Image: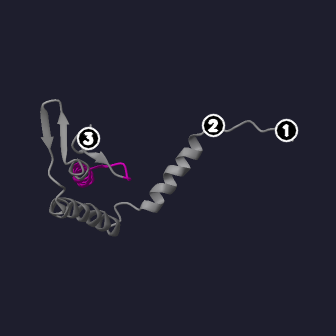
Amino acid sequence: MANKKSGPWWALKNSSGKKDVALTLMVLAFASSLGLAGLGTIENLDIGDASIGFRSFDMGFATTVLIPMIGLYFGRRYTDTQRGLYDQQSLWANRTEKKLLTEEKLPEQPE
């Protein structure tokens, strides 16, 4: 039995169905940037006697973390496409054909 390396269990799958660490890192960087931007809109949160303060969103964080992750993912995707590892258009067409072939055919209606 051949051992196929499927990737880490925590990695998201890309459009070709393979686990992709670069995609996972990009999504995590985007989610953390979005979360920090959302928390940055709340200046102070008072709950009873407790007070929680948040810093305003630092655009340097997004520039330092998010932009390189986006570059990593789309740069790798571009080189994979150039090397012919997957073709997005044919991948979409194959999925559509499989879906059409697996759907049940409706009985013909008399006219």
Could you say whether the residue bearing mark 1 is in a helix, strand or loop? Answer: loop
> Which image quadrant: the C terminus?
top right
The answer to which of marks 2 and 3 sits earlier in the sequence is 3
**Could you say which disc has been placed on residue 110 in the image?**
1
Outermost residue on the right side: it is 111
Q: Which residue is mark 2?
A: 104
Main SS of residues in magenta: helix
Query: How far is the residue under mark 1 from the one under mark 2?
Result: 18 Å
Residue 2 is marked as: 3
Magenta run includes residue 23: yes
Residue at coordinates 12% horizontally, 30% vertically from top-left? 49
Q: Measuring 77% from the left and 39% from the top, which residue is drawn there?
A: 108
Q: Nearer the viewer, residue 107 or 27?
A: 27
Q: Is residue 43 left or right of residue 80?
A: left
Which structural element holds mark 3?
A: loop
Quadrant in which residue 5 is drawn = top left
In this view, the mark in front (3 or 1): 1
**Quarter residue 26 falls in:** bottom left
Q: Quadrant of the N terminus?
A: top left
Say which of 99 and 41 sits in front: 41
Query: Toward the viewer: 25 or 62?
Result: 62
108 inside magenta stretch: no
Q: Residues within 10 Å of mark 2 (few under 14, many from 20)?
A: few
Q: What's under tag 1, amino acid-wise?
A: Pro
Report the mark closest to the observer, 2 or 3. Answer: 2
